Image (tube, coloured by chain):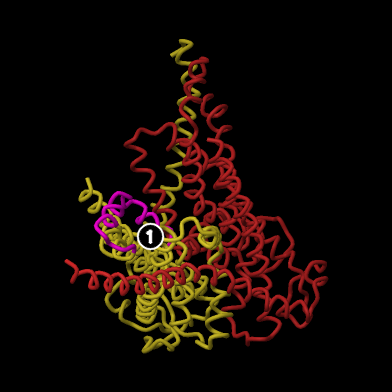
Chain colours: A yellow, B red
Amino acid sequence: MNTPQARARWPERAFFALSLGAVLLPLGILLILLVLVGHSGIGRLSWEFITSYPSRHAARAGILPGLVGSLWLMGLTALIALPLGVGAAIHLEEYGKQSRMSRLIEINIANLAGVPSIVYGLLGLGLFVRTLHMGRSVLAGACTLALLVLPMVVLVSREALRTVPMSLREAAYALGATRWQTIRQVVLPMAYPGILTGAILSLARAIGETAPLVVVGALTYVTFVPDGLDAPFTALPIQIFNWVSRPQRAFAENAAAGIVVLVATMLVLNGTAIYLRSRLQKKRS
Amino acid sequence: MPAQVPAAEALVRVSSRGERVVEVLLAACGFATILTTAGILLVLAAETFAFLREVGLGKLIFDTQWTPLFSDKHFGIWPLLCGTLLTTLIAIAVALPLGLLSAIYMSELASPHARAVCKPALEVLAGIPTIVYGYFALVVVTPLLQAVIPDLAGFNALSAGAVMGIMITPLIASLTEDALSAVPRGLREAAYALGASRVPTILRVVVPAAMGGIAASVIIAISRAVGETMIVAIAAGQEPRLTLDPRASVETMTAYIVQISMGDTPAGTLEYRTIFVVGAALFLVTLTMNVTSYRLARRFRRQT
């Protein structure tokens, strides 16, 4: 133990332990968080909780409008953000690589990715709710979320397009295919799984967002499910926020149960994305 | 053979018209992202301008109270900036050591197997919705801290900041790890050849060489903390206050926007405009930091 070598080694060990601790501490906190939320939410979790409307009585309240609202938002966001995002990615990767416009779009997307989500909420409020007269509707919420995830969709789609080898494009051109024919029949089919994975991850992020929807004007007490694009709406994170903000303990339990549903939904989405990615990697190799 | 030529030509013409349409459509998709930025700037600028015409820039900058909802209205933005500064400082105080050490562990010390476990686990941490962290800060961390610090307010900057620190740790860890991995192996080998052991090599050679990239990652994390909303809206309180006391209830810029949005504030009123003014300040602060970080990262990539 007292050899010089051992003495020289202990600071190294201490540093190793410290660094390992720095990784384990946040992960430990994550674990504690999940266990605590699960523990306090599990009692409220039931089929009734999922299919009931909110109520003044914590024990009778449910998340149906929030859940349906979140599904609406996710579907609409996908419909708006995916074509725009994938289109922009194709434009940047396959068409105007050198043009000044593309440079500008690239820098712009990098900047947009760093804009706080609540600022997108203000954009949605000023643009969709007021200027375009959509009101505080599910469509205005979805448009806002779509712009929020757009930079992420573009980034992941570009990465997927970049994995397609140049030689395949050249082979298609050599066979007389035009640019768009090459993209549609050669590049997109190959990049498709990567784009899909990225799209799912982007949507998973969208359903966890709370702040922009609060600003756009999602309601906190809704006793109906949206019946059209112009209907008022709420979303699962908004419902959770509403319950967390109440002082009664019973509502905190509702919030925990809502969090369990939200996190489970996100885990399913992320799991699907990881599964698709690994299946793609197996196919390639 | 000659009979086929016009057919082929016709095909090319049809497809080339289609080609142009597709090309324009795709360019329009790219342009939509520019319109998003333009939209943000226009919306923020229009409402801020209307606000300034009514109130004046002086009151925004030289007043030290923020009370737009009271009958005695003050519009000094400093209390909100101070709340944001305080929660951000606490978050960075937590995230900087944790993030740096995690990055060093994953890049320099961990076995490939341990790394393959830790990296995705930290990614999970980064993917959790912030509303969940907000619940955690208010329902779990605040009562815990109150047991240790008796005069901690029910809503306080400390819990919100600390939980926010945990939230941004993966961001610092992952970007710093990229920076450390980009340091050429030759530098490490040269240090070993001079007789340095592992830890001094990491701390005196690898970390200094990656400093540009590390700084970029820390700045982007600060920017994220400044723009973070739900944790502070839930756990830090709604009392705009010029204080750096972490035990006190404060209000950040983002929490103020949420507070007003939760109420019924009719469009066109002064209260309604204040959230765009605060949003504009938030946008300017985060944009400055993002651009700085982007420049630092680019310079760092050129060096390595």
Q: Is residue A170 magenta?
A: yes
Query: In the rendering, at what x and y percent does residue A60 appear?
Result: 36, 81
Q: Is residue B171 magenta?
A: no
Which span is picked out in magenta? A154-179
- The quarter in which the N terminus of chain A is drawn is top left
Query: In the rendering, at what x and y percent does residue A101 appear?
Result: 53, 63
- Chain of the residue displaying label 1: A
Against A36, is A248 above or below?
below
Against A21, is A257 above or below?
below
Q: Which residue is mark 1?
A: A157
The amino acid type found where label 1 is placed reads Ser
Q: Nearer the viewer, residue B240 or A234?
A: A234
Q: Nearer the viewer, residue B281 or A92?
A: A92
Q: Nearer the viewer, residue A147 or A188?
A: A188
Q: Residue at x 49, y 55 (%)?
A: A98
Q: Residue furthest left?
A: B1
Query: In the rendering, at what x and y percent does residue B109 appear?
Result: 42, 31
Quadrant in the picture for residue B242? bottom right
Q: Residues within 10 Å of mark 1 (few under 14, many from 20)?
A: many
Q: Residue at x 58, y 32 (%)?
A: B208
Q: Residue at x 42, y 56 (%)?
A: A33
Dominant secondary structure, magenta: helix
The reply to whether residue A62 is in sight is no
